[in-house]
Amino acid sequence: MIRRPLALFAVLLLSGCSAVGPDYERPKIPVPEQWAESAVGTQAQPDKWWKTFNDPVLDKLIGDAITSNLDLKLALERVKDARALRTATIAAGLPSLDAKSSVSRRFNNSSSPASQTGTSSAGGGFGIGNQFINIFQMGFDAQWELDFFGGIRRAVEAADATIDVEVENSRDVLITLLGDVARNYIELRANQRLIAITRENLHAQQETLQLTQIRRQAGLASMLEETQAQALAATTAAQLPNYEALVKQSIHALSVLLGREPGALTVRLDQQGAIPTVASNVLANLPSELLQRRPDIRRAERQLAVANASVGVAIAELYPKINLAAFLGLQNTTITDFTPIGKSWSAASTLTMPIFNWGKLNANINSKKAQFEQAFLSYQSTVLSAFKEVEDALIAYSKEQERHKALAQAVAANQLAVQLANERYQKGLTAFIDVLTSQTALYQAQSLLVASESQLSSNLVALYKSLGGGWQTEAIVGNVNRSPADN
């Protein structure tokens, strides 16, 4: 019964040993107290930001994308892969037990000096002559590498951090997915609106063309005026195929984002809908909260933890390795006599320690330290880039609001200008070119206003994305937090 105290002693010994290598500490990054650019208004709620658009169609697309997107499924499978590798890493530090059986045949040829000189073995020689020996063996083989210096523990730390990296990567994929769905949907609705505006302007221009033709037949207009009206109508009509192609491409993109064939959503999205907009301004969260919200920052920090643990794994290679091995089973020379009476056991311990390896181990340590510095610089760069993205999104959203307001005034003024130009032309008080100019200006202003509405919503999506909004969605959180035993 000596085995239990020995096992207990080994556990206590291992628990008392500290792992070699640096212990990880989360780096402290200077964070500004507030954003340089800030919109005055309601507080941003980035958890389910698409709800702020109050668009049921967009809500449904987002829900379907979270469920069916292939890139997101791939990212979640990488999380499962990382968890499985962690289990394998832990298992490498535990004792292993294997069933072992073997059959061997040995030939012995030994004789005494007397036999070599020709003297008979019966006269005092001790030779055993030629002899074949069969050995049949069956039992259990146990192996255990004692982790005195923490190499395996550091490997487990790296595996834990790798799981976190893949979890944050899946969240980053989700944020990108949400942004892509919203952006393509906004572009779809914007191009559908441009088609409607183009048709409205084309209809008005065709009516002007018909009026000009009537006036020319009555001698009140020239052929030049008629051809100018024809050119304007044809130029406007030429815009329709471009917008129609963009509508189809947006539908194709949304279909693929939902994990379906490109034309799967044509019937569902072919009807025109309003561009999703948010009336209120947005006040972004504090910069310090960004470090906890953005998955790319969290992922970079976890990659730093992986690199730190890898340094410890490399340093542990400099220290001795102790392996315990044991065999317990049955052994006999005749298979017919292979009974429990022929018991066999063995126990061994090996100690290996590097002495001379041409600097290979130290070079590997230096490499891991350099990789840690690379990860630290990458983490700093990721944080700075994140701050920049938020500042850019804030100023873009704020200035687009100003632009949208000015364009709305321009559309109203151009509508009045078209009305006045038509009235004055019909009364002979102005040239026909004024009518064409006002119609052209109106169409351009209306197109710019639609583009501004689309850009305003897209900028808001970019702002929510830069704030790390969306990964808290219950569907993704449930998947990445589920243990392998639940699958």
Image (spheres, rainbow, N blue to C red):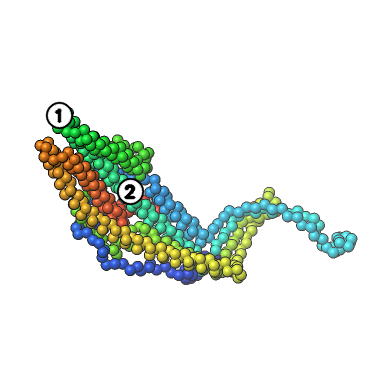
Quadrant hosting residue 128: bottom right
**Residue 189 appears anywhere in the view:** no
Question: Where does the image place residue 129, in percent across and percent down from the top left?
Answer: 81, 57
Assign a secondary structure to mark 1. loop
Could you tell me the amino acid type at mark 1? Ala
Q: Which residue lies furthest to the right in this view?
A: 118
Give the mark nearest the N terminus, 2 or 1: 2
Q: Residue at x 20, y 35 (%)?
A: 225
Report the disc number at residue 97. none
Work out which quarter of the rendered image holds the N terminus and state it. Answer: bottom right
Q: Can residue 137 be seen in this view?
A: yes
Percent x, y of residue 137: 65, 54
Disc marking residue 218: 1
Instruction: Check disc 2 and report its element: helix, strand or loop.
Output: helix
Q: Label 1: few (<14), some or many (≥20) within 10 Å?
A: few
Indicate left or right for 372 with 350 as reference: left
Apparent side of residue 132 relative to residue 437 in the rendered image (left or right): right
Which residue lies at the image location 33% right of the left edge and 68% below the top edge? 30
Q: What residue type is labelled 2?
A: Asp
- Image coordinates of residue 440 in percent, x first then y, are 21, 42
Q: Do the residues labelled 2 and 1 touch (CB within 8 Å)?
A: no
Front tag of 2 and 1: 1
Q: How many marks?
A: 2
Q: Identify residue for label 2.
A: 180
Q: Look at 44% across and 67% down and name the residue there.
A: 373
- Residue drawn at x 14%, y 29% is 218
Q: Where is residue 387 in the image (x, y as percent from the top left)?
A: 31, 62
- The one of 106 and 53 positioned closer to us in this rendering: 53
Q: What separation in Å lies between label 2 and label 1 (alpha carbons)?
A: 56 Å
Viewer-proximal residue among 26 and 375: 375
Q: In this view, does 67 lie above or below 24?
A: above
- Seen from the viewer's position, the closer of residues 403 and 97 is 403
